[in-house]
Image (tube, grey):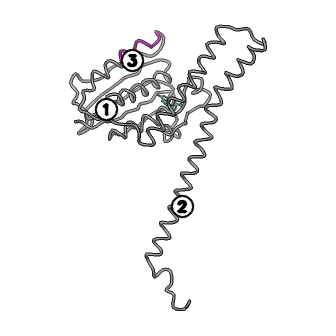
Amino acid sequence: NLDQRMPESEIPELNQLGVSFNSMASSIEDVEKRRRELISDLTHELRTPLTVVRGYLEELADGRVEPSPEIYSRLVRETRRLERLIHDLQELSKAEAGYLSINAKKINIRPLIVSLVGRFADQLLEEGPVLKLDCPAELPPVLADLDRTEQILVNLLGNAIRYTEQGSITVKAWKDNRQLWIAIIDTGVGIAQEDLPFVFERFWRADRSRASYSGGTGIGLAITRRLVELQGGKIEVESEVGQGSTFRFCLPIA
Ligand code: ADP
């Protein structure tokens, strides 16, 4: 009997259910949209180096170009890019599925920082930036996974070097309350303010052509953020175009 039915607004549970259902439906749509974007980004990322490799191989096979060291090194570079892309994707999917195991222990992070700074300093060209360390002699131990922390530092230092032509890259560490902060400060190309909210999104790159020239995949920072968060820390960025960027992250003090 319709007349006896209560008006909808008088059944709060029903209203609530409606609201929950709507928000569920829209979050399913969001997931589906992200999945489609991911596949389309992925296809693009994989196709670009493949097209270059196939193009050169066909020209070589037809005798349209002579084999040369330049062509071979371009082929090697593009193949490496594919390799790196696949490796990064594997890491990212593990991280997103929660399979990246974190083996957090009480560790002393200073020796890791010092050895990485030494390793990266050896790779720098004479005309490139200098690498500096700004770290007190004593740092409190943190509760973290040594390998994952190394991965974070390698990603951030690698980026700093890739996007800095001259000036300096400083690795700074300090204690703040219950956290240990580590910052990688560069004097490189910088990132535009409007781009900053996207830097940790997978496949995001400030300038596709420039980043692709530098061998970037746009996945490194997405993994890096995940690795920091899995260890209970957070990561932040500050940057100014033409001035440089600062990426800093914290880990819980043990
Ligand atoms: P990529 O493999 O392209 O470097 P990342 O996820 O590590 O991927 O970085 C995403 C994008 O963020 C880069 O393509 C670049 O545009 C920008 N970026 C990252 N680090 C820096 C930095 N230190 N200086 C300037 N731009 C940076």
Please tell me how crowded label 1 is: few (under 14), some (14-19), or many (20+) other residues with Cα within 10 Å. some
Q: Position of residue 231 (x, y in %)?
A: 33, 38
Which disc, if any, is residue 25?
2
Name the residue located 66 percent from the left edge and 12 percent from the top edge.
71
Q: Which portion, as a residue range, is magenta?
A: 117-125
Q: Who comes first in sequence, dot 1 or dot 2? A: 2
> Could you give the CA–CA distance between mark 3 and mark 1, rounded to whole angstroms?
25 Å
Circle nearer the N terminus (3, 1): 3
The answer to which of 169 and 5 lies nearer the viewer is: 5
State the quadrant of the C terminus: top left
Q: Residue at x 42, y 34 (%)?
A: 224
Element class at badge 2: helix
The foreground one among 27 and 60 is: 60
Other-residue count near label 2 (Cα within 10 Å), few / some / many at <14 / 14–19 / ≥20: few
What amino acid is at disc 2? Ala
Q: Which residue is mark 1?
A: 145
Q: Which residue is mark 3?
A: 131
Quadrant containing the N terminus is bottom right
Horizontal and vertical percent position of residue 156: 42, 28
Q: Amino acid at mark 1?
A: Asp
Tag 1 secondary structure:
loop
Kindly identify the residue that appears in the image at 54 percent across and 29 percent down: 85
Q: Nearer the viewer, mark 3 or mark 1?
A: 1
Q: Nearer the viewer, mark 3 or mark 2?
A: 2
* Of the image marks 3 and 2, the number of the one nearer the N terminus: 2
Residue 123 in the magenta stretch? The answer is yes
